[in-house]
Image: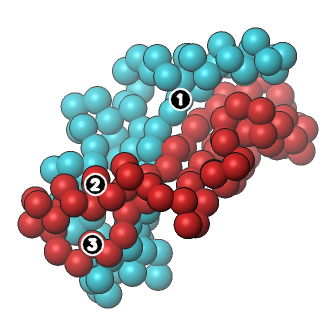
Chain colours: A red, B cyan
């Protein structure tokens, strides 16, 4: 079973990487880029075949390792 | 208008970051994690209001800056 985790910085947390990308896009001639936020997308291949149990396990992985919940939010997607 | 770009390593390209996450998950007691791939998710806030033009612009950004198309694939999502 496949799972996807989307990790983004919380609103209000400064994103220097995103700012750097925004500046670089401007320097390349792209105008009208008002904001850029860079997050992570983590694809997991799991042996677990029950979607509910898989989601619970992935949420625990996020809390323990994949996301820093002080400054990041995460979203879990289970793919059938 | 908002756009999201998903950048992942191409199949067959080694992902040391994903491997490190897989090992760390195993060390934390999560069993049955068969594979982990780590990619980027980039959220863009654009002044452009036409979805077709926005998508074209974001694809150009990917080709020029956001993705390394030698080793990475990207997917563009335009949010209304």
Q: Circle 3 sits on which residue?
A: A33
Query: Is B41 situated left or right of B24 in this image?
Result: left
Q: Nearer the viewer, residue B26 or A2?
A: B26
The label on residue B37 is: 1
Calculate the distance from the C-alpha at mark 2 to the C-alpha at mark 3.
10 Å
Q: Where's residue A67, x and y in %?
A: 66, 41
Q: Point out the frontmost of discs 3 and 1.
A: 3
Q: Nearer the viewer, residue A38 or A80?
A: A38
Mark positioned earlier in the residue sequence (2 or 3): 2
Dot 2: what SS? helix
Q: Where's residue B14, x and y in %?
A: 41, 17
Query: Is B38 situated left or right of A18 in this image?
Result: right
Q: Where's residue B45, x and y in %?
A: 38, 73
* Same chain assignment for discs 3 and 1: no
Q: Circle 2 sits on which residue?
A: A21
Dot 3: what SS? strand
Q: Quadrant of residue A57?
A: top right
Calculate the distance from the C-alpha at mark 1 to the C-alpha at mark 2.
22 Å
Q: Point out the frontmost of discs 1 and 2.
A: 2
In which chain is the residue bearing label 1? Answer: B
Dot 1: what SS? strand
């Amino acid at each position: 079973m496949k799972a996807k985790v989307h990790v983004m910085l919380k609103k209000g947390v400064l994103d220097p990487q995103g700012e750097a990308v925004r500046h670089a896009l401007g320097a390349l001639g792209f105008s009208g880029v008002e904001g850029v936020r860079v997050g992570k997308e983590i694809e997991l291949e799991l042996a677990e075949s029950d979607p509910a149990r898989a989601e619970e396990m992935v949420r625990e992985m996020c809390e323990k390792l994949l996301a820093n919940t002080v400054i990041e939010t995460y979203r879990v997607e289970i793919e059938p």
